[in-house]
């Protein structure tokens, strides 16, 4: 199960672990997943590939409802632009999916955000228009 994260969900994050260099990717998808551990690589059950994840502090509480921990994962699906950067007809030639953010904006405890780089608007629209 996953959801879009809110800053209140991220208060217990202490570390972002990147499995790939985020500087090489103009966007990644972020999700808040329920997992059974505070730290370490979580199970990844989506198509595509896991790019990174968060680790929580030692006092991070389990959800009272599920008994699991809420941790962010960062991933790409097979059809995402960073996987097919030269495809002129790709679904995200401009823009990005709802849950996509620029990985350079990711910090522990802070929701990532979209940028001109993640939206690929700087190349399409001149500054000041």
Image (spheres, rainbow, N blue to C red):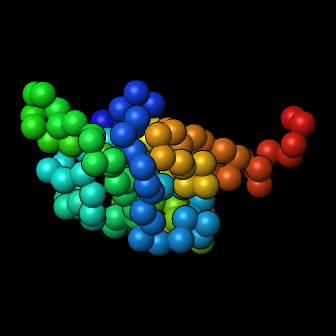
Count of labels in the image? 0
Position of the N terminus by quadrant: top left
Q: Which is more toward the observer, 42 or 101? A: 42
Residue closer to the observer: 82 or 110: 110
Q: Quadrant of the C terminus?
A: top right
Q: Work out which residue is located at the far front of the displayed protein and give it.
A: 59
Q: Which quadrant of the view contains residue 25?
A: bottom right
Residue 55 in the image, given as x and y percentages of width and height: 34, 54
Q: Residue at x 47, y 40 (%)?
A: 109
Q: Is residue 123 left or right of residue 79?
A: right
User: Residue sitting at 23 percent across and 60 percent down?
Assistant: 42
* Residue at 17% over, 32% down: 63
In the picture as drawn, the residue positioned furthest to the left comes out as 66
Name the residue rendered at 37%, 53% in the picture.
54
- In the rendering, at what x and y percent does residue 47 appear? 26, 62
Q: In the visual, does 96 lie left or right of 54?
A: right
Left/right placement of residue 51 relative to residue 1 reads right
Q: Is residue 69 above or below residue 44?
A: above
Residue nearest the viewer, comparing 96 with 67: 67
Measured along the vertical axis of the image, is residue 21 above or below residue 71? below
């Amino acid at each position: 199960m996953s959801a879009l994260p809110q800053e209140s969900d991220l208060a217990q994050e202490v570390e972002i672990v990147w499995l790939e260099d985020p500087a090489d990717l103009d966007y990644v998808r972020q999700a808040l997943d329920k997992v059974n551990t505070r730290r370490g690589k979580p199970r990844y059950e989506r198509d595509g590939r896991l790019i990174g994840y968060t680790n929580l502090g030692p006092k991070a509480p389990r959800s009272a409802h599920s008994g699991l921990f809420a941790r962010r994962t960062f991933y790409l699906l097979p059809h995402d632009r960073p996987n097919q950067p030269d495809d002129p007809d790709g679904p995200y030639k401009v823009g990005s999916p709802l849950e996509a953010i620029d990985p350079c904006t990711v910090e522990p405890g802070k929701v990532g955000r979209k940028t001109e780089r993640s939206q690929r608007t700087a190349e399409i629209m001149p500054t000041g228009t």
